[in-house]
Amino acid sequence: MQEPAPPRLNMHDVLHSVLETLNFDRGIFRTLLDLLTRPRTVIETYLFHDRSKYSKPTTLLLLTLAAAILSCRHWLPASNSYSPNLFLTITASNEDELKTLALLREYDDVLRLLLVPATSVLSYLLFRKQAWNFAEHLAFNAYILAFQFFLMAILVPLTGNQYEWVAGVAILGYHLVTYQRCMNGPSLLTLLKSFAVAIGSSLIFLAIFYPITTWLI
């Protein structure tokens, strides 16, 4: 027996879906606010208690990615350098390198999605005592990257030419503070491991995609 067709989609359904996504009690605004003020609560609630209270990490990641892309395309000035983070900067010195950097900058925000698995591999290896499986590390790091995209989206129009340094400090700072809060409690060892995850994931990112973009040109 054929199942009945669902009701026709109308504007009320569309508006309800948008408002449900933006809902302050459990939508993206609540998730972003709590990721700023109490990230451990967000992570532990989503992983171990109630996954309906906050936006899913993949949904939040894609929405903040879109916001970061729009912000960067509109506000970010052209440059002859590319900085995946505060410490790793590539500067172009010839025409081929300029083309490579242009490709990296053009697809930078989308390529950064691959930092989620790269970061998760490192956090899984360095924080084994946390007793999280790899999928839980993926969700954890997706939330972190989503908030970093949000920071990028709001800092680009505010900082202009100083964006890369200001955003780099803010993004790294958020990464370190969140790891300190969520991984085994604050300690020097946790700080050093968190720093290693941040730098190591960016090195993996560059080791894979800088040769590929060079080959493409």
Image: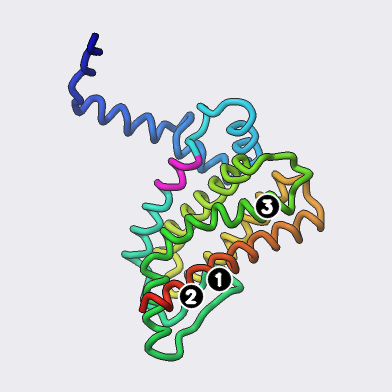
Q: Nearer the viewer, residue 186 or 161?
A: 186
Asked if residue 115 is positioned above or below residue 17 in the image, the reply reads: below
166 or 116, which lies in front? 116
Q: Are marks 1 and 2 in contact (CB under 8 Å)?
A: yes
Q: Amino acid at mark 2?
A: Pro
Q: Magenta region: which residues?
A: 57-62
Q: Quadrant of residue 194?
A: bottom right
State the residue position of label 3: 123
Q: Secondary structure at mark 3?
A: helix
- At horizontal 81% and vertical 53% (from top left) the residue drawn is 187
Mark 3 or 2, nearer chain start:
3
* Coordinates of residue 40 in the picture (x, y in percent): 66, 40
Q: Which percent across, then down, holds residue 57?
A: 50, 41
Q: Position of residue 5 (x, y in %)?
A: 21, 17
* Circle 3 residues within 10 Å: few <14, some 14–19, many ≥20: many
> Disc 3 marks which amino acid?
Ser
> Image point 54% across, 29% down: which residue?
51
Position of 58 with respect to 200 (left or right) is: left
- Is 201 situated above or below 212? above
Q: Relative to residue 78, is residue 13 drawn left or right?
A: left
Residue at which label 2 appears: 211
Query: How busy is the neighbourhood of tag 2: few (under 14 within 10 Å), some, or many (20 plus)?
Result: few
Q: With respect to residue 93, does 150 lie above or below?
A: above
Picture residue at 44% right of the left edge, 61% below the top: 111
The chief SS type of the magenta part is helix
Q: Position of residue 49 (x, y in %)?
A: 62, 26
The residue labelled by disc 1 is 207
Q: Earlier in the sequence, mark 3 or mark 1?
A: 3
